[in-house]
Amino acid sequence: MARTMTYREALNEALVQEMERDQSVIVMGEDNAGGAGGPGEQDAWGGVLGVTKGLYPRFPDRVLDTPISESGFIGAAIGAATRGMRPVAELMFVDFLGVCFDQIYNQAAKFRYMFGGKAVTPVVIRTMYGGGLRAAAQHSQALYPIFTHVPGLKVVLPSSPYDAKGLLIQAVRDDDPVIFCEHKALYDTVGEVPEEPYTIPFGEAGIVRDGEDATIVALGRMVAVAVEAADDLAPSGVSCDVIDLRTTSPLDEDTILESVENTGRLIVVDEASPRCGMAADIASLAAREAFGALRAPVQTVTPPHTPVPFSDALEDLYLPDAQRVANTVKDVMNRER
């Protein structure tokens, strides 16, 4: 049975259900327990945007407040995962990855390979990313391509409350390290979410809109932008496939290529910087594997290669929006090769 709930609530419910199911699941991060051990209300925060609110009273021994030391607690989570626990650690903003990156890319990502498949590291690192909330250049980046570049990491970007719950449960149960990226502008979005636990397999993109004239590939918050653009184009007779990647590693290449073979046109919408980003990677995939089907050059819609502006007006110009996506689709429709 499905009910309507927010993206934030769906993530919280996923954590509750997995902690009830499996005693080895622990949650750790800054303010996850609201300053436990100090004066004042316990469970005051639940993380910086409230995703873990309510967990501490239910699981007081398994919700851990940590010092402001990402290298310390991310390293501790990875170590705990190698010893039989299933930690869910919160790297508050993805922008802080530099503080703890060695533990992630040079340790956790390598263990299974270096130990001949005998070592498992079932750690989930939840993190917030993305612009649009006037958080400036050090708290607004979309850095998931950096994690995607590293073999051994699984990288997840849910775009809806339904996907948020199903993908997080899958992440907790997975035996590999998972980087779980939550766009901070999605926490209050609402959608239908089943009450019972369920999983969404990694590497299976979602087709959120069917069309015949062009393929739009998007991820995270950009999925809603792509759908809005497709809706705006429909009255003019242009129908678009909209593909939600869900995960960037593993990447569902088959769904992308099947759609491009059908439509002959590809537009990739990505909030990350254009250099070495997912848009460039997917454009390369299409050019390499579906060149004969392309009826026009592949186009990408991304921010410019600059830091995220703090100015309201500049940040609005920086981020891809539905109008830019629709204009790009129109341009592709008019550029037959």
Image (tube, grey):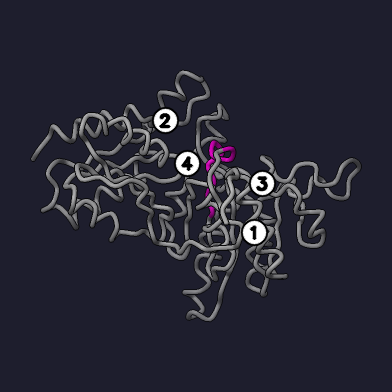
Looking at the rendered structure, the kind of residue marked 4 is: Ala
Please report whichever mark, 3 or 1, sits nearer to the chain's N-terminal start. 3
The stretch in magenta equals 180-188
Helix, strand or loop for disc 2: loop
Residue count near mark 1 (Cα–Cα under 10 Å), binned few <14, some 14–19, many ≥20: many
Answer with left or right where residue 284 lies relative to residue 8.
left
Q: Earlier in the sequence, mark 1 or mark 2?
A: 1
**Viewer-closest of 235 and 308:** 235
Q: Residue 165 is drawn in which quadrant? A: bottom right
Residue annotated with mark 4? 142
Q: Who's the residue at 79% across and 60% down the image?
A: 59
Disc 3, SS: loop
List the residue tagged with mark 2.
Answer: 319
x%, y% of residue 141?
A: 50, 38
Q: CA distance from mark 4 to mark 2?
A: 11 Å
Is 276 covered by the magenta stretch? no
Q: CA distance from mark 3 to mark 1?
A: 12 Å
Task: Point out which mark residue 247 bears.
Answer: none
Q: Residues within 10 Å of mark 2 (few under 14, many from 20)?
A: many
Q: Amino acid at mark 3?
A: Val
Q: Which residue is mark 3?
A: 51
- Tell me, for residue 88, which label it has, or none: 1
Callout 2, which amino acid? Leu
